[in-house]
Structure formats: structure tokens, C-alpha cells
Amino acid sequence: MTPGEKDLRPEGEKDLRAACGTPAAPGAGAPVREVYLDYAAATPVDPEVAAVMLPYLTERFWNPSAPYARAREVRDDVERARGTVARLIGARPDNVVFTAGATEANNLAFAAVEGHVVVDAIEHESVLACASTHARRTVRVGADGIVDPAAVARAIRPDTELVSVELANGELGCVQPVREISRVVAAERARRLEAGERTPLYLHTDASQAAGALSVNVSSLGVDLMTLSAAKLYGPKQVGALYASDDVRLRPLVYGGGQEGGVRSGTENVAGVVGFARAFELACERRADEVRRLAALRERLRRALLAELPWTVASGPSNPKRCLPGLLSVAFAGIEARRLVIALERMGVSVGTGSACAASRMRVSHVLDAIGMPRPLAEGSLRLTLGRPTTEADVDFAAAAIVRCVRAEMARLGLDDAGQGARVRALRAQWAGQGAVR
């Protein structure tokens, strides 16, 4: 911090940083290497994306709603971007609404209904907050974070209007069985039709974390509403989209000039939506190769940690095919993750402890609570997420830094490997559940 600059960090974080006597990086001064492993929180804008955005921040600055020719050209560029996003999800352009990010898209989805909703317990906080404004049921998940479609079926009531289950969780990496859940929703619709009931029922999925790694074709998924975010696709922040099928009537949250078909008023973020479309296009083009590369790097990181700290607990599904390829959630029993984050930062490694929303408040995530993770593990959990810039050398450096910081904390607390192994075995027994730990 510069002299005179006010420290706006929470008091708990300031106290913790002051108290942390963390190991220094080799040599004096700044860390010898900078490794970022929090790509689930934010991705850098791809250079190709930045290049297509730049003209709209300089010479092509016109308001798309203006009547003259140059403004109409910009309007056409917005519609081309909408067409690109629609094509990539298998939809029509008029089913895509651009928003200021995934949170707004989730809010728009929930605003489309007034009745009862069903969500699962590990949804992003924006979804859970939206659900809290409705009558609702929250479906419990397994210890591996997976939603059971049968549990969703049991949660649906005759007055349920919306089911919302994310395509992939951004903290555990678990990929949810959205297609199977869509069959549950379709069966309930068929029952209502046969019974002469007129209450609508829609399926929403937040695909923000999944779109770079999984197919998000809306027909294949069987969804009526889907949220996307440019910020998770190496595109600009504060840009997203909501897909809504023809059957869904969206209600505006923002009133004004009637942009986005009257659903989302306000001058269009032309640079943002053009960048979003290009980022999504690049992500789809590179998906197959990148998924294989990230999965290999994740396994390399997991093996490196387990080789040095064999009592490490990796949470989420045991089947790697049910996980996002670049996400590894690990827990170190009895070691405070908040101290590890600070120690690693001083060694040049940036990691998260869960969603950025929870991590900013330095608290245990609701996701870890929801899967029943024992507190000594939850408080020692790190979320390590890899991205396009991540290399094998980055993974090796980060693994060595994590091991060093964990060992330093063990020494501070008087812990040893034998004791940690026994403690983890006891915690595993407490946290019984198929696929919970591996």
C-alpha cells in the first residue's frame, strides 16, 4: 500500500496477514516466479478478443440506437455477435439476451417466474439469492457434489415453476446431470398437460463455469433458460447472456429505452458483446485440445501433492469425467487455508479457497458445508484452477510452494505426517459418502 492509502480489507484479513509468519521465496525481494491458479474466478482477456473489441472503444464508438448510418453499422455488429452466440449454443438469435454478466442473467431467469422454485444446495450465491425471493425447496447433494435427478423429482411440487441446476460447479468442479434432470422436468410437464394443469415449468442452468469445457447446446441439454459469462471464457468482465426459449416470457429488471427486445434497457456494451462472441467462438474451437491439456495438468498437480503430502484430501467426484478438467479442490486437515493463501501469495502463487464471493469474506464456502465436509477439512480447503497460460513448469512450481507452505504450517502447529494421516482417516470415516474423497 502507498503512504496515506486507506486499508479497506476486512479487519480479520488484516489481522491474519499481520500475524502470518510465512516462508519467504528463494532469494531476496520479489518472488522468483508468478503463478496464477484461480482461473475459475477470473480469466485474462485473450489478445484476439481484445483486438476485436478495441475499435468499439475508439473509432467505432457510436450508439447502436442512433438513426444514422455509422450507428446502424454498429447495431449490425451487435446482432452479428448475438448470432454467433446463438449458433454456438444451437439457438436462434432472438432467444439470446445480452446482460452485464452471469449474475444479472440469473436474476432475469428467476424474474420470469412468480411461483415455487427448486434449486440445489451448491448453486452459485447469485442463484441461491434469487431463489430466496420465492417459495422454494433446496435439493441436497451427495458428498461428491452431484445432484440426484430423483431428488429433484421429489422436490417438484404442483406449483413449481422453475428448476435451476448449474451445469458445473465452480468450487468442486462437479458436472451435473442436467440432461437427466431435463427428463424429470419433461415428465412433470407431461403429467400436468394430461391433468389439465396450466402451471408452467422451466429448467434453468447456469453454464458460466462449464462453457469453456463442455458442450452447451441447449437442445442437447434440454434447458429452457441458460446463463453464460464472458469473464469465464477469456472475454471481458461484466458481459454475459441469457438464453430463453420461446416458451419463456422474460420480465425486465431494468426499464428505459427498450433495448434487448425490451428486456434489458440501456445502451448496449458493443465492445463487450463483440468480445464475448469472439471469446466464446475461440473457446469452442480450442475446447477439445484444451480439455485434454488441462486434465493432464490437473492430474500432474494432484499426483505431486499426494506424493509429498499423502494425507491430502481431494474433494469432488472420483470419476474425472464428471469434473471440470482444470479444477482441483484439495483439503489439508487442520491447516488454515486462509494462512496458506497469504503464504502462497508471498511466494508468487495465487490460489482461491472457494468462490471469489466467499473468499472475499474469508469464510468457509456454503458449497463445502452443503457436501457435509468436516470443519477441519473445510477450513483447510484450497481451490486450484488451471487455465490457458498454465504450463507444466507452473504446476510444478505451485505444487512445491504448496508443499512448502503446508510443511511450514505443520511445523508451527507441531503436526507430523503420521498424526495427519490418522486424523484424515478419522475425518474420512466421519464424512462417509460414495465418491466423497479420493
Image (cartoon, rainbow, N blue to C red):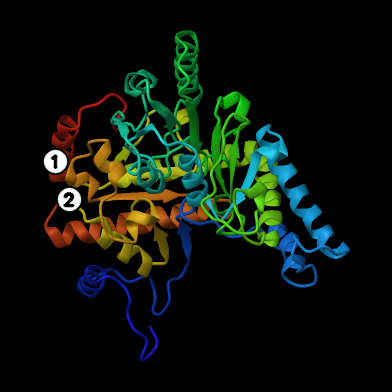
> Is the residue marked by circle 1 packed among few (<14), some (14-19), or many (20+) residues within 10 Å?
some
The residue singled out by tag 1 in the image is: 423
Q: Quadrant of the C terminus?
A: top left
Quick check: marks 1 and 2 in contact, CB under 8 Å?
yes
Amino acid identity at mark 2? Gly
The mark found on residue 334 in the picture is 2
Q: In the image, is 313 to the left or to the right of 418? A: right
- Residue 296's x, y, as percent? 52, 39
Q: Nearer the viewer, residue 312 or 13?
A: 13
Q: How many marks?
A: 2
Question: Quick check: can you spot residue 311?
Answer: no
Q: In the image, is 335 to the left or to the right of 248? A: left
Q: Nearer the viewer, residue 342 or 148?
A: 148
- Residue 395's x, y, as percent? 47, 52
Disc 1 to disc 2, C-alpha distance? 9 Å
* Residue at 67%, 47% in the rendered image: 261
- Residue 92's x, y, as percent? 71, 35
- Residue 17's x, y, as percent? 26, 71
* Residue at 79%, 67% in the rendered image: 60
Q: Nearer the viewer, residue 342 or 213?
A: 213
- Identify the secondary structure beneath mark 1: helix
Is 205 drawn above or below residue 179 in the view shown?
Answer: below
Amino acid identity at mark 1? Arg
The mark found on residue 65 in the picture is none
Q: Nearer the viewer, residue 307 or 75?
A: 75
Q: Residue furthest right?
A: 69
Q: Quadrant of residue 118?
A: top left
Q: Quadrant of residue 281?
A: top right
Q: Quadrant of the N terminus?
A: bottom left
First in sequence: mark 1 or mark 2? 2
Question: Quick check: can you spot residue 202?
Answer: yes
